[in-house]
Image: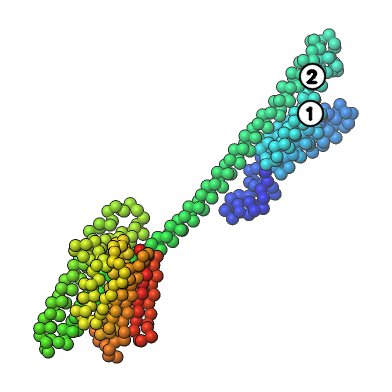
Amino acid sequence: MTATGEDRTGARMEGRPVGPWWWERWRGAVLDGALAFVSAVECSIEGVEFARDAGLPSSVGVVFGALAGSVLLVRRMWPVAVVLVFIAVAPAQMGYLMGLVGLYTLAASEAPRRIIGALSGMAFTGVFIVWFVQATQITRGEDAGVSGDAVVGGDEWFALFLGLTVAIGLTAPPVLLGLYVGARRRLMESLRERADSLERELQLLAERAEERAEWARGEERTRIAREMHDVVAHRVSLMVVHAAALQAVARKDPEKAVKNAALVGDMGRQALTELREMLGVLRSGDGFSTVRSAEPVSVPLAAVGAAAAAAASRAEDEVGEGPCLAELEVLVGQSAAAGMVVELSVEGEVRVYAAEVEQTAYRVVQEALTNVHKHAAGAKTHVRLAHRSAEIAMQVENGPPPEPGAAGAARLPSGGNGLLGMKERVAELGGVFVSGPTDAGGFRVSAVIPA
């Protein structure tokens, strides 16, 4: 029932009033001081009669009663000592207020139940014996100034009843009230600790949610950039290559120039169609209508990523759900039409895979061919596709450019994100992606995706 140093320090930091010594608040100190004063006065008055019966000076009884009653000052620190003092002075018929307050404080404290029960039993026994003996003396007419004829009966049952009634009245109510108050206080402290724990957990969850939202924002930005890059970059790169070839042969071979111009127009229209599809989905909010009530920070980016993926899948091919391995020949043919010397070889038994596997394989080959156009224009390229029992493997390898300056002849910009995007796509499906230069001065891109 005492305030520890840690609790008092915390109370000072929180600005709460802190009482002196072992009191948590000043009002508790004032209350205990008032109770101790009243108890000291009571015990002093009762001590006068006790000293007279014992043949001692009245001043001794007053001092003894004042000292005994003032023990209530330490009831919060040592409630056991208060009850023991009450049991000690009970035969002198003094300290009843001290007994009531002491038993209540002991029962409400954190003392073990066996100690509370033992001291309560001792106090009950002491009060019962004192009042039983006194009532017996009254009924037998042994008190001074009362004759035997004036005593009604001499019945000891009255003394027993009086002793039990007084003992129960002085011990049971304070003990029961103290037990109730102590249990309620412990329950409130437990609820307060649980509330603090829940508040800390909610704070941690909020921090983790913010971290996950930040991570989701980064993932969606990467995903949107990858989708835009895969959908548009290849055709735009081919358009630039054809435009450069058109500029070179415009005067020498008008027929070939017209053919290249038609190819550029077709590829431009396809690129515009894909961009229009994607931007149309993003502006119409197809991915937003179902998530209006969600978190305003992370959901829009997630919806944008989903919308970009949906637009990309719709814009890839007007008759299918997206690019597939069956379209590799068309893809290779487009690069060949742009002037690349490219060969396609397929090994193993051709079969159908999951849509995401075929799309990823297609994208890897597409991006590898785009990189050849950017960095090794005119280099001979070999595309290999291998169908295996539990996986599908692809490899795009090109030799060195035929002329030292051919690599940058088309002046195609490069952001350096193509290889990273391919690696991320393959890793999402549990595959392996490897890229790097060859000993012959070319470049090789390899990927293996589980089927």
Q: Nearer the viewer, residue 316 or 118?
A: 316
Q: Secondary structure at mark 1?
A: helix
Which residue is outermost to the top?
Answer: 149
The residue drawn where x is 73% and y is 24% is: 166
Which quadrant of the view contains residue 107? Answer: top right
In x, y percent, where is residue 147? Answer: 85, 12
The residue drawn where x is 23% and y is 81% is: 340
Q: Nearer the viewer, residue 295 or 41?
A: 295
Q: Is residue 250 left or right of residue 279?
A: left
Q: Is residue 317 something that shows in the picture? A: yes
Q: How many other residues sit within 10 Å of disc 1, few (<14), some (14-19) or many (≥20)?
A: some
Q: Amino acid at mark 1?
A: Gly
Placement of the N terminus among the 4 image quadrants: top right
In x, y percent, where is residue 76? Answer: 69, 42
- The span from disc 1 to disc 2 (Cα, nearest Å) is 14 Å
The residue drawn where x is 12% and y is 89% is: 252
Q: Nearer the viewer, residue 350 or 379?
A: 350
- Disc number placed over residue 126 in the picture, else none: 1
Which quadrant of the view contains residue 97? Answer: top right
